[in-house]
Image (cartoon, rainbow, N blue to C red):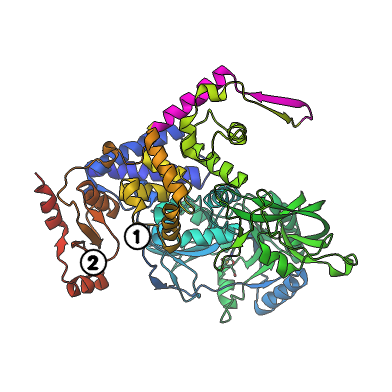
């Protein structure tokens, strides 16, 4: 069986490489999924045979409390950089003067992501470390393992010890999706894909990292007696071993060729599916690289030529203030349309009042709009000389543009809010739309237009009102509006429409508590957090009375999320809505079959696990929960016992000893749950 599992693991890794690195799959997604399913089943049955490079290990699950600091084998230098082509000529002169033979260069794209160093021992990924200060960085191995284009096990004639360096990046499509999801639950969106990639790598929950859609490119191999003599040839080997390498690179024999490459990619970068911020020029011959050596900070054999951000000036026409589902008011500038890096820009977010003040924007000002590596245009300054006389400075509105409530600022947040959570139409409608959305209660017989009608007619103000709707309240309702083509249109609720709507609402009572909890729209509680909270607290009543400290015992829940949950259940309006949802028959408890309890032997017990077990930590946690126990991450006087695997953390052991908390070995724990009947 071990051999078969190994073979299946190897095959799947090969297919993974074909798909993610070579972009050339040789089997269908369906066949791949079937094979993966088979491996998953076998691994469940024979957990002792799970291979460290198994593709099933990529889903993440390890939750780290803090990243260990690790020293780099070779310091991670940065590149000297310039914005001018003339300085590239200077660089070439310095290089050629120091060498006996003429240097040939390789030009590559300069990826705008997060630098990473991977170390492979006997072909297995040993660790992944961020650049940090160049001497030491953070060990982010668990998170990096979730990136499917990174090999866990190398192919072919790899050396015993190998370090590769490259960049972790977030493609535009994944960035847009991530930011849309964040804004949806009321979190600040990331400013650009680089920040998003870096934030993702530093997440403590690797299962969350797995969902972010990170990708990579590797551009440097380090080690002893590596089987190539030039940088260009190193890529052939890197690719053979399983790494995703830059798809765009060019050998250049002259400054002219380098200049052409730089100007070509300064324009064509707009078509790339990820951000780059320049071009890197490297001496091709590795012996020549060694002769040139490095200064304390930069290698002398490479230089980065950075692109200047593209900038245009255009006139401000007006500012819209938009109110979102969470009450945040966002100022958006309407601009005189202008062409910038291939796209027509006519609107740009000004984010918040602080930004308007910093830029000191006046009415009708000429604004500089910039598009750097980033995909979103940004307003970076004002051309004061073009300001019209007596132009007034832009004042942030004081009252909600929708419901006229006085706006507020919370603590030290930059955002301005409309506090009229239950009376401000865009907020109420936004909450209702969220409640019925696909990942929430999934009532697809309702939609934005219908919700608007129900709200305008005073029939639905909070989600529980959906369940009070009756055919006679709805049939015959009509709304006239102007269609996009300028013609007069009518939506009317006919019998069939109403029947479908009510059937959809009825069916939503089957939706699990996990999703209902997400549907409630608690700020910062996204799909994953809702799932974790539901599984931990099991009922809405238990969640509603939880203290901040109790909430923080759940993975993923920090101060901000805990505070938001407490506030949600402090509001009478929310409590009333929950009571009405319960009366309507909506699921507010985890169903028995979801709890899949095996026994109650650990009921009421709070357990901490530490170290490495024969099964994954996730399965260990599941076991505790299946037997009625509660797994928490840190030891306190409330802990009943600790289960210690190999290499239990010394801090944890000391703490357990100090608080006199029993420490069980893995086998003692197994014995305990065996005794369950
Ligand atoms: S080579 C010793 N090649 O730019 C030089 N770097 O300041 C090793 N970068 O930290 C770097 N694309 O994160 C190299 N094609 C590329 C690159 C690249 C992006 C980043 C890298 C480095 C920074 C230089």
Residue 415 picture quarter: bottom right
What x and y, as percent, mark residue 337? 82, 50
Distance in Å between CA atoms under marks 2 and 1: 33 Å
Of residue 421 and residue 327, the one placed in the foreground of this image is 421
Question: Residue at point 26% right, 73% down?
Answer: 651
What x and y, as percent, mark residue 173? 59, 47
Of residue 512 and residue 90, the one placed in the foreground of this image is 512
Residue 508 lies within the magenta run = yes
Count of labels in the image: 2
Badge 2 marks a residue whose secondary structure is: loop
Question: Residue at point 24% right, 61% down?
Answer: 608
Query: Considering only vertical position in the picture, is 474 above or below 553?
Result: above
What x and y, as percent, mark residue 526? 46, 49
Query: Considering only vertical position in the picture, is 319 above or below 652?
Result: above
Residue 639 left/right relative to 104: left
Query: Dot 2 corresponds to which residue?
Result: 647
Query: Dot 1 corresponds to which residue?
Result: 547
Q: Magenta stretch mostly in which secondary structure? A: helix
The quarter of the picture where the C terminus appears is: top left
Q: Is residue 194 visible?
A: yes
Q: Nearer the viewer, mark 2 or mark 1?
A: 1
Q: Residue furthest right?
A: 389
Q: Give the crowd class for mark 1: few <14, some 14-19, many >=20 residues within 10 Å.
A: few
Question: Residue at point 39% right, 42% down?
Answer: 579
Badge 1 marks a residue whose secondary structure is: loop
For the record, the magenta segment spans 485-509
Ligand 1 occupies quarter: bottom right
């Amino acid at each position: 069986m071990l051999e078969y599992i190994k073979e299946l693991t190897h095959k799947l890794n090969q297919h993974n490489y074909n798909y993610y690195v070579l972009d050339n799959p040789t089997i269908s997604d369906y066949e791949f999924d079937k094979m993966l399913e088979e491996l998953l089943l076998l691994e469940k049955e024979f957990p002792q045979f799970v291979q460290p490079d198994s593709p099933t290990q990529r889903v993440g699950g390890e939750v780290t409390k803090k990243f260990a600091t690790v020293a780099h084998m070779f310091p991670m230098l940065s590149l000297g950089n310039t914005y001018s082509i003339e300085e590239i000529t200077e660089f070439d002169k310095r290089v050629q003067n120091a060498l006996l033979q003429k240097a040939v260069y390789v030009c590559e794209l300069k990826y705008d992501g997060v630098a990473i160093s991977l170390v492979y021992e006997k072909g297995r990924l040993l660790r992944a470390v961020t650049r940090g200060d160049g001497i030491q960085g953070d060990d982010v191995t668990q998170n990096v393992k979730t990136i499917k284009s990174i090999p866990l096990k190398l192919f072919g004639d790899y050396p015993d010890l190998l370090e590769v360096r490259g960049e972790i990046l977030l493609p535009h499509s994944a960035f847009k999706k991530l930011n849309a999801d964040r804004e949806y639950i009321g979190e600040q969106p990331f400013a650009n894909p680089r920040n998003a990639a870096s934030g993702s790598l530093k997440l403590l929950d690797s299962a969350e990292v797995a969902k972010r859609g990170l990708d990579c490119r590797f551009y440097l191999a380090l080690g002893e007696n590596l089987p190539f003599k030039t940088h260009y040839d190193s890529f052939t080997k890197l690719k053979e071993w399983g790494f995703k390498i830059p798809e765009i690179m060019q050998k250049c024999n002259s400054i002219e060729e380098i200049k052409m490459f730089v100007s070509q990619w300064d324009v064509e970068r707009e078509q790339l599916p990820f951000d780059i911020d320049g071009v890197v020029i490297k001496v091709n011959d590795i012996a020549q690289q060694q002769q040139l050596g490095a200064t304390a900070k930069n290698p002398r054999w490479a230089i980065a030529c950075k692109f200047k951000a593209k900038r245009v000036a255009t006139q401000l026409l007006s500012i819209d203030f938009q109110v979102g589902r969470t009450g945040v008011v966002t100022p958006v500038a309407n601009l005189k349309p202008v062409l910038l890096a291939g796209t027509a820009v006519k609107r740009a977010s000004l984010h918040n009042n602080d930004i308007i003040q910093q830029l000191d924007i006046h009415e009708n000002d000429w604004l500089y709009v910039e598009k750097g590596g980033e995909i979103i245009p940004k307003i970076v300054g004002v051309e004061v000389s073009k300001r019209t006389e007596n132009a007034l400075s832009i004042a942030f509105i004081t009252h909600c543009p929708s419901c006229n409530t006085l706006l507020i600022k919370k603590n030290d947040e930059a955002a301005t809010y409309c506090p009229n959570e239950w009376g401000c139409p865009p907020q109420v409608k936004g909450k209702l739309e969220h409640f019925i959305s696909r990942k929430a209660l999934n009532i697809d017989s309702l939609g934005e237009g219908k919700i608007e009608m129900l709200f305008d007619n005073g029939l639905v103000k909070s989600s529980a009102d959906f369940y009070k709707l009756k055919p006679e309240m709805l049939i015959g309702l009509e709304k006239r509006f102007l269609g996009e083509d300028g013609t007069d249109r009518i939506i009317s609720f006919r019998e069939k429409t109403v029947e479908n709507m009510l059937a959809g609402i009825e069916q939503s009572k089957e939706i699990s508590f996990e999703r209902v909890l997400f549907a409630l729209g608690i700020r910062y509680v996204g799909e994953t957090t809702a799932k974790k909270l539901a599984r931990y607290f099991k009922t809405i009543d238990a969640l509603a009375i939880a203290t901040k400290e109790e909430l923080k015992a759940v993975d993923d829940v920090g101060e901000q999320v805990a505070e938001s949950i407490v506030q949600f259940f402090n509001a009478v309006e929310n409590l009333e809505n929950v009571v009405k949802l319960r009366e309507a028959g909506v699921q507010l408890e985890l169903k028995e079959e979801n709890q899949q309890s095996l026994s109650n032997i650990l009921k009421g017990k709070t357990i901490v696990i530490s170290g490495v077990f024969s099964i994954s930590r996730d399965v260990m946690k599941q076991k505790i929960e299946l037997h009625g126990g509660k797994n928490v991450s840190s030891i306190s006087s409330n802990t009943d016992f600790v289960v210690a695997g190999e290499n239990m953390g010394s801090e944890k052991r000391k703490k357990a000893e100090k608080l006199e908390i029993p420490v069980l070995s893995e086998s003692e724990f197994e014995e305990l749950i065996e005794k369950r009947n």
